[in-house]
Image (cartoon, helix red, strand yellow):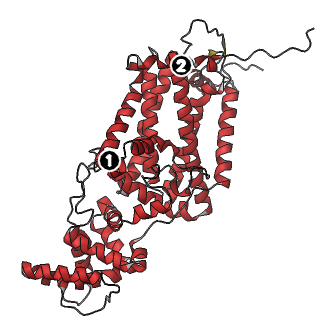
Amino acid sequence: MDEGPESPQYGPHTNALKTLRDKVYFHRLPSYGNKIFYSLGFLALTCLVLLAVTGITMAFMGQTWWLTNPWGIFLRSVHLWTVQAFIFILLLHVLVGFTTSGFRAPRRMVWVFGAIIFCLVLIQTEFGYGLRGDFSSQFRAVSGADFWNGAYLGYWLNPLNYTQTLVIHIAIIPLTILVLFLAHYLLERTYGIARPYRKDISYTMVPADHRILFIRGGALVALILALAFFFHSPYVPAVRIADIARQDPSLVATTLLQEFTRTSDTATYFDSIDPYTFDTREVYVVTPYEQYLANSKKPNAWSAFISASTTLQKADIQGAQQYVGATSMDFSANTTNPVIAMLDTLMPIAQSGLYESLLDQENPSINNTYTLRFLVDMGIPEAKAATLTMDTAQWGMTKDETGSVWKLPPGSWWLLPLAVVNSVFNLPNNLYGDRDAAFILGFIMLTFILFPYIPYLNRLPELLNLGPLIWRERPPPHDTNKG
């Protein structure tokens, strides 16, 4: 039977697939090219595909599913462990390129594209944490907002805005990474695997072992699934205003009064720029009070306050300060003080959970920015993070909710450079700490990306001379049949 090119087995579709494969695959490599060191790019792509599959599934199923459903928890754990593997593999990939001087001309842009991808992945992980719906999301969102504000980007990047964070995490950064990855690989395919810069290193050209490549990829996926099955993604419930209002009503009432007098952290926020330009009195007291009052027959205490003289207003505020400082408060007490009357109206609403809903509905375009800032004004995220040893003063957020970098799954160990910068420069106690951290890390990232173009510094790998450890060929197996 004739099995020519037009036969079913070798039809046009098969030929097209073979042509595509021929264009995509490496077919002949230097003899060291089949080592696992040169499989890292493929393993990183494997992680990228797994992240896309798990991320898209979770986006369709929703936050409640991945936080409460057993399959959702497993998939969330797969996503987390894949992130761990992805960053670890990318780091190894960078080290191999550095050690072997794989960035030498004409391959400089191969390094540049890869370095940008690495930096984007690190940023991507933090936006991902902001979407989980747990306490880590809250703490990292407010910490990230301070960082971006310090970097003068707070008007455009607001981690407190869930919708914006979602779009950045599932669309903007992934699409950018995909484009850069294609450019990175096309250049790699054009130039081929980097050859040794030392003339005394000998090598031969051998066929590419695609089989071992896919075996390694399959083993990586199996390992990630196993780790996700046995070690779930950590979960600490998100903090709610209603919980705090029931546990410590005095704290909530005091914060409401600070918002009213415009003396809270949000009202006086200063971190290089001030993106929180809203009036805290209007947002946290007047608007929710009047929204609730619309369905009530109570007299409007706010109207009474603004119609009073300045002297009387000051006296009412002083009386309210004494009231919230008392050991107990009667939210149903009749009072002629309009400020206390507004607090007495808002406190039961806060305890019921309605207050948080009213805040989120005031400006849906920024989602729960108001709610998170109110929690910050109460000092809740920072205090809770300290109990979990994950705040900035305790080596950044490298420990996550696990409480220790040695527990599984590990924390965000890739943030260690930020933790070192914070510690060395004592940035947590610096008024401009977030700005300085942004500048320092920005300089480090820029140096990393442009490394191939920096004279003298780009010769460092040759001085270290670690390339032969990767290029070294295995000795041929001993033939026992030969005498």
Q: Is residue 117 above or below residue 143?
A: above
Q: Earlier in the sequence, mark 1 or mark 2?
A: 1
Q: Could you tell me which residue is drawn at 58 percent across and 37 percent down? A: 46
> Left or right: where does residue 214 sit relative to residue 103?
right
Q: Crowding near pointer 2: few (<14 within 10 Å), some, many (20+)?
A: few
Give the image location of residue 455, x and y in percent. Answer: 38, 16
Is residue 50 visible to us here? no
Q: Are marks 1 and 2 in contact (CB under 8 Å)?
A: no
Q: Residue furthest top?
A: 199
Number of numbered discs: 2
Q: Left or right of 459: which side holds 160?
A: left
- In the rendered image, the quadrant that contains the C terminus is top right
Residue 101: image location, x then y, percent: 51, 18
The image quadrant of residue 474 is top right
> Residue 340's x, y, as percent?
23, 84
Residue type for callout 2: Leu
What residue would you read off at disc 2? 464
Q: Nearer the viewer, residue 46 or 413?
A: 413
The residue labelled by disc 1 is 433
